[in-house]
Image (cartoon, grey):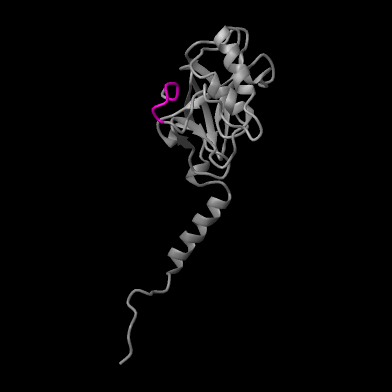
Amino acid sequence: MRAVNRFRRPLSLGTLALCLLGTGLQSLGCDDENKPRKRRFTDTEGRIFKATCSAGSCTGLRQTKGPKWPGKKKVALTVSGRYFGVCNSKRGGEPESLGDCRVLVCEKNKDCPHPMGLKTGSCLSGYCAEPSQSFTQQDSVMLCMKGLGLGTSSSDQLAQYATGLNCGEPCKIPSSCAQPWKVGDHRAAY
């Protein structure tokens, strides 16, 4: 007597067509992860931003709440190393210095922008991160400036800005700055 495999059935033409159609739509950018969505981001200074994001990029970033940076009207989302941040500028979305940027904070992965090719962002120890990247000078400055308010003109801001710039090569976050891998850090919790 021959054994019969009850679980192996040929696909019907309808099922096969649906599978192929679904695969084709995904390759054309019609899958759910590529659908533009309104997103809300928060930085370490309590500012709230909104943007429309899809397929690893965000457009139309604008500040909706929180303190405004005097004279700097444009905001731009940035990631130059490990952390996502928002930078202010007078023209063209380019910051004049690394001190014009603040890191994005989060509670869950969905609070963060997602890098190209990934379905979701990464929230690591309360910061929006691109975990495959190394720390950069910009990451160091953003962590050192955390919670000091906007600008770089107060004595605390100037001191922490200088500290952040001197993170070495490879960059190591200075001990006087927020340490994202220490959950109980005095400046890591937002």
Q: Residue at x 57, y 7 (%)?
A: 155
Q: Position of residue 5 (x, y in %)?
A: 34, 79
Q: Is residue 75 visible?
A: no
Q: Look at the image and tell me in which quarter the C terminus lies.
A: top left
Magenta residues, start to end: 183-188
Q: Residue at x 38, y 74 (%)?
A: 9
Q: Position of residue 152 (x, y in %)?
A: 60, 11
**116 above or below 5?**
above
Q: Is residue 160 visible?
A: yes
Q: Position of residue 34 (x, y in %)?
A: 53, 42
Q: Nearer the viewer, residue 23 or 99?
A: 99
Q: In screen coordinates, is 50 left or right of 101?
A: left
**15 above or below 73?**
below
Q: Residue furthest front?
A: 175
Q: Look at the image and tell me in which quarter the N terminus lies.
A: bottom left
Q: Position of residue 120 (x, y in %)?
A: 48, 40
Q: Main secondary structure of the magenta part?
A: loop
**163 above or below 37?**
above
Q: Residue furthest left?
A: 1
Q: In screen coordinates, is 40 left or right of 77?
A: left
Q: Residue at x 49, y 55 (%)?
A: 22
Total numbered circles: 0
Residue 174 located within the stretch drawn in magenta: no
